[in-house]
Amino acid sequence: MNRNTAEKLSNAAQTKHNKSLVLRSVWNNNGISRLEISNITRLSTATVSRLVDSLIQDELLMEQQPMAAPKGRPMKPVCFKAEGHYLIGIDLGTTYIRGVLTNLSIEPIKEIEVVTESHKDPEYVLNKVVQVIMNLASTNLVDPTKIIGVGIAVAGIINLNTGIVEYSPAFNWRNIELREFMNSHVPYPVFFDNVSRAMALGEITFGNKPGFEDLVCINVGYGIGAGIVIGRKLFYGTDGMAGEFGHFPVKGDEQVFCTCGKKNCLTAYASGDAIAQRAKIGLITDKSSILNQIAPKDLDAKHVAEAAKNGDPLANAVFAEAMGYLGRAIAGLLNIFNPQAIVLGGGVSLNGSIFWDNLKPVIEENVFDHRSTKYHILPSSHPDKSAIYGALAMVLQEILNLSLTIRK
Ligand SMILES: [Zn+2]
């Protein structure tokens, strides 16, 4: 490569980097002026003006009506052009596939929910995901050529280098070539990640506490997983397996096993599946519990939580035991990572006081609390949609990084 070509390339990379800085500053402060962008990014006002004009050309940004400035010319606030481009987010859960089409301001335009039928073969399930994506894109409300990308949140160990779901106990999948399948069936760039990591990305992108730099987002649903954020970046670990919190070893009793087959995993005590299984074991000898009214095949963690709220002793004991194991493990995470916050999402966390009142005292009792700032234990910012927001965040981060081809 000759020197001129190398210089041109590095100039292009620098411009892209600066454009991304401008875009991020507008995302964080929608409606700011070019002068304010210059103050935030430390780029000259002339450079900011040139980059903003280019981003307006790309239909990522737009100018609002001029406002009177304290001195000089009226300022024109710069904001995202909501209808400039569109995103699709998919929550591929074991029970439901949920999808949403939004504009650039992440306002929902169309939503779809279908039953997953996860017991069927992987190709059948992935074809259903494709149908949801194509159905979302097929609306006269948007120009489908302006759909910029699709994010998919899915449970399992995912190799982002190869695009393969290596192992998903929830779906009973091994080595599913997710990227290849989606690339050959969907006409948009598709991004995917583990659901718990997606939820953590959603939390730092769209969450109620945008100032947090270090946090751990824990998904307590049918299984348990975590997304670890260090310095506002997702932590993946050497093999991309960081955050497998459900397989955190605790003292097991061989009554319930983890989906991975081991007996000592946290999942075998505190997951939604384990809570239901342990209640069923309790019902063998407890004939007075109100849970006896539910057919064993239908009994899930939600029933146990409801019965516990109604004072059922068996349900209370099962739930308290589950939260004891979860709380001690979370105290361990606080001790190891010293995050500003632990954010809790997933179906089990949606059970209100029976979840929080059992969990928080255990954390407080077990944490090594000699820190100068108080840690926060918080519910997810979008409690029943955290996976969908995570999926949308994957696409939005690609937009903010300017990693996508913008079609005008
Ligand atoms: Zn396990």
Image (cartoon, rainbow, N blue to C red):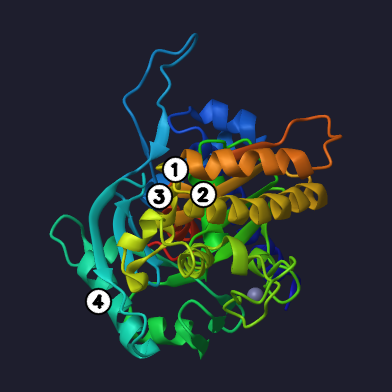
Q: Earlier in the sequence, mark 1 or mark 2?
A: 1
Checking the image for residue 131, the label placed there is 4
Instruction: Give the quadrant of residue 270.
Output: bottom right
Residue at the spot 59% in from the left edge and 46% down from the top edge: 343
Residue at the spot 29% in from the left edge and 70% down from the top edge: 133
Residue at the spot 61% in from the left edge and 77% down from the top edge: 257
Amino acid type shown at disc 3:
Ala
Residues marked 1 and 2 touching at CB (< 8 Å): yes
**Residue 354's spot in the image, x, y percent?**
50, 43
Image quadrant containing the C terminus: bottom left
Residues marked 2 and 3 touching at CB (< 8 Å): no
Checking the image for residue 292, the label placed there is none
**Residue 403's spot in the image, x, y percent?**
52, 63
Residues marked 4 and 1 touching at CB (< 8 Å): no
Above or below, comparing residue 121 to residue 213 in the picture? below
Amino acid type shown at disc 4:
Gln
Q: Which residue is mark 2?
A: 316
Cα distance between the residues tagged 2 and 4: 42 Å
Amino acid type shown at disc 2:
Asn
Q: Which residue is mark 3?
A: 307
Mark 4 nearby-residue class (10 Å; few <14, some 14–19, many ≥20): some
Amino acid type shown at disc 1:
Gly
Q: Which residue is mark 1?
A: 311
Q: Nearer the viewer, mark 4 or mark 1?
A: 1
User: SS of the residue at dot 3?
Assistant: helix
* Horizontal side of residue 244 vs 222, given as left or right: right
Cα distance between the residues tagged 3 and 1: 6 Å
User: SS of the residue at dot 4?
Assistant: helix
Above or below, comparing residue 136 to residue 396 in the picture? below
**Residue 194's spot in the image, x, y percent?**
54, 68
